[in-house]
Image (spheres, rainbow, N blue to C red):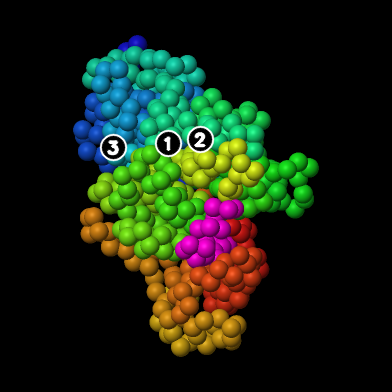
Amino acid sequence: MVFEVSKVPTTPFDDQKPGTSGLRKKVKVFVQPHYLHNFVQSTFNALTPEKVRGATLVVSGDGRYFSKDAIQIIIKMSAANGVRRVWVGQNGLLSTPAVSAVIRERVGADGSKATGAFILTASHNPGGPDEDFGIKYNMENGGPAPEAITDKIFENTKTIKEYLIAEGLPKVDISAIGVTNFTGPEGNFDVEVFDSASDYIKLMKSIFDFELIRKLLSSPKFTFCYDALHGVAGAYANRIFVEELGAQTSSLLNCVPKEDFGGGHPDPNLTYAKELVERMGLGQSNPEVEPPEFGAAADGDADRNMILGKRFFVTPSDSVAIIAANAVNAIPYFSSGLKGVARSMPTSAALDVVAKNLGLKFFEVPTGWKFFGNLMDAGMCSICGEESFGTGSDHIREKDGIWAVLAWLSILAYKNKENLNGDKLVSVEDIVRQHWATYGRHFYTRYDYENVDAGGAKDLMANMVKLMANLDEINAIVKGARPDVSKVVNADEFEYKDPVDGSVSKNQGIRFLFEDGSRLIFRLSGTGSEGATIRLYIEQYKKDPPKTGREAEEPHAPLVEVALTLSKMKEFTGRSAPTVVT
């Protein structure tokens, strides 16, 4: 099949600034004539010629509504821009971590390696004709495009006048594995559809002791439940957990990927993973059967995870700290030691305490996985995490939800390897409580105020920036709200200087640091497609063993009251309660 290249005139859109997670908008925005085309061409124009002409690109995503149409458009535009070949996961499905793995690990039959990828996802946001779509570009290291590239993309979107497309290229069947060959003005162009899971499974088997995990899952005392929330993780769940590790098919929930995620919100937290939460004994009603020993959930593109024990929730901040504390013994990939660990600024300081006790390098970075990627590329970080249910390591350059589940299963398998025939297995709760006894407990919660008026959200943040300059005024407000709360000793906007490239990231969140180690943090999140999301993080540290077992709400209540008073949350947003509490 021979194709021709067309230059299509276009005019700029004024809303195509990619955030840390790419460009996210409602589907109705993306389906506008030229909208997706403009962004894709602007991306090609932002890359150096060798990353486009003659290159190999990956194009896939979480399978949400509009993905299949978008893949065909990007194939046609890739051909027109001189790309040599496009790799597509079967049915257009590749998890975000799998895309990173494919870029880093996969070698084509002709020796080709990918230099980048268009990932089609809006992550944990809902899907469907009236919901969200997203696109982002990942680089040759498998990680998200750095700011220098996303800034260029945005500048290009403001001045674009035309895009290139091979309109006559027929639709490629992405449901069938195989290679389709075309010929254009610059020579051959191929589209290869490949198995979505094989490369990723091969990588996981090189990291974890699958045989040890299999022994745990085969124990009649160990029960397991995994909820993909109808996201792309379903394309991997049966292959990994059932075929490779021997779990029962009945242990998989919502593992058929759907364009609209089954009408649900594919965000793995206690609010949206309702079926799993009920099954694990954490819902409003008591389950009819005994809850499983271990449960986990993924988001839409499978880069986030939630870990649960029987009637027990593991905070993401505790999760990464516990993985780091046990990695060397429990996970073969880390048997020679950890290079360092890192967390995002809003994440609790549980990982800091582990790093200090184990003598590890530690880094606190802004929210955004690219900051971890820089450290990893420089050989400075092995394990990292963020409070928004993202955990990962240097095996790829994205957070990785299934990796986190396998890490926890590895820790459970290691702790129980001599105990599978004993009276009682070491449980998730046992592991967490032992961790608190050793390192202390960081009581931590996050309040999300979703889809608030953007103007009101900005005014709230601006008011707190003004307030930061006067500690006396801050402490007067604190004492007026709750006299029993410790004194604020520092208030600032978090700023980060990257130790690798020296770049400085400013205005990364407002922090109130208290004398007793407590923290209040406020951030505006850019992961939604409409309005604004204000995120409030509340943290209090307790080292005294009798206090580490208290319910989380007890120590938080006074700090919550102080936070809502300091921020004037209701005054600026009209909200009297958060949308989501995690």
Residue extent of the magenta highlight:
429-455
Against 392, residue 201 (above or below) is: above
Mark 3 or mark 2: name the one nearer the start of the chain.
3
Secondary structure of the residue carrying numbered label 3 = loop
Task: Tell me how far mark 1 sits from mark 3, CA to CA.
Answer: 25 Å
**Residue occupied by mark 2:** 213
Q: Whole-percent x and y of residue 561?
A: 61, 75
Circle 3: is it few (<14), some (14-19), or many (20+) Cα within 10 Å? some
* Residue beneath the point at 50% across and 70% down: 543
Q: Quadrant of the C terminus?
A: bottom right
Please tell me which residue lies in front, 185 or 386.
386
Sequence-wise first label, 2 or 1: 1
**Image quarter of residue 342:** bottom left
Whether residue 199 is in magenta: the answer is no
Task: Assess whether mark 3 and mark 1 are in contact (beta carbons under 8 angstroms).
Answer: no
Foreground: 14 or 472? 472
**Contact? badges 2 and 1 (CB < 8 Å):** yes
Quadrant occupied by the N terminus: top left
How many dots with numbers?
A: 3
Q: Position of residue 555 (x, y in %)?
A: 60, 72
Q: Earlier in the sequence, mark 1 or mark 3?
A: 3
Residue 305 located left or right of residue 84: right
Residue tagged by mark 1?
208
Q: Which disc, if any, is residue 140?
A: 3
Residue found at x 35% / y 44%: 334
Q: Nearer the viewer, mark 3 or mark 2?
A: 2
Say which of 534 and 374 sits in front: 374
183 up-or-down from 204: above or below? above
